[in-house]
Image (tube, rainbow, N blue to C red):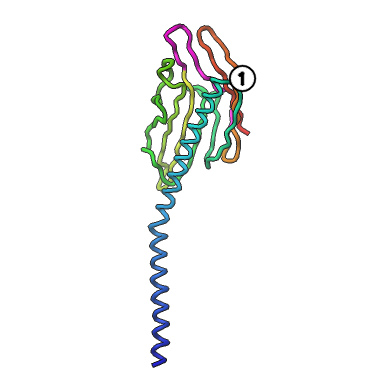
Amino acid sequence: MSKLKGQHEVITTLLITGVLIGVVGSILFWGMPLIQKSKDASVLESSEEFMKTLSSKIKFIANNGGRDQLVITIPGTIKFLPNDPAGPRVQLIVDTQGTIYATEAEIPLGRNECSRIEGTWAVNEPEVLCLTSRELGTNSYVTTYRLNYILLRTEGVVSYQIVLTGSDATSGQGHTLYLENTGTQQTGNLINTVVSIDIV
């Protein structure tokens, strides 16, 4: 009888171990993609919030003067392109295994559509903030956030624009963006408020 009791304990232990291995395997098989999806969504939402914060800081400095800084907390590549043919811009490029956005479409993150190059004072916002998400392959996406500023015309003869200046720069997480209002420049009826960007 004691011999059967010993076999019973061994069989029970083996069955419990087998069930546990099966449960853990199922959790890993089904749970890991969900965890990665949640992680990717968090990174993309944080990237969007980072670019909105950057835009708010630039507008505040343009309107009120002074300087500010913003630490890059996003696991991506940030670029300042002062000589871009479409105008000076800041880009944030983020690689993920999934996306929360429609792919291959320009998506505005503000009130201006992505193709807008000028607007009306007190009607349109001075910035164009958009993103594009592209699928590179299976479980591989790149999302590019773009921030630039447009000319705003008034009902009178004067027009206004925030102009970003500085050196061409590329950097990433842990570095800092330094922003400074360096004054205004008037050319004819156009008044430019100049904000310099430096990435250190």
Q: Quadrant of the N terminus?
A: bottom left
All told, the count of numbered labels is 1
Quadrant hosting residue 182: top right
Q: Closest to the observer: 142 or 131?
A: 131
User: Where does the image place residue 119, in percent across and percent down from the top left?
Assistant: 42, 17
Image coords of residue 195 (percent x, y): 57, 22
Residue 166 visible in the picture: no
Question: Residue at left 60%, top 32%?
Answer: 199
Residue 160 is left or right of residue 135, and the answer is: right
Given the image, on which type of amino acid does mark 1 rest?
Thr
Q: Quickly name the residue at label 1.
A: 182
Q: Is residue 109 above or below residue 149?
A: below
* Residues drawn in magenta: 151-169
Q: Residue furthest bottom?
A: 1
Q: Is residue 174 above or below residue 123?
A: below
Occupied quadrant, residue 17:
bottom left
Residue placed at 54% from the left, 32% from the top?
79
Q: Find residue 142 and report its horizontal and vertical position in percent.
A: 45, 40
- The C terminus - image quarter: top right
Which element carries disc 1, helix, strand or loop?
strand
Q: Residue at x 40, y 74 (%)?
A: 16
Residue displayed at 60% across by 35% down:
176
Q: Is residue 87 left or right of residue 4?
A: right
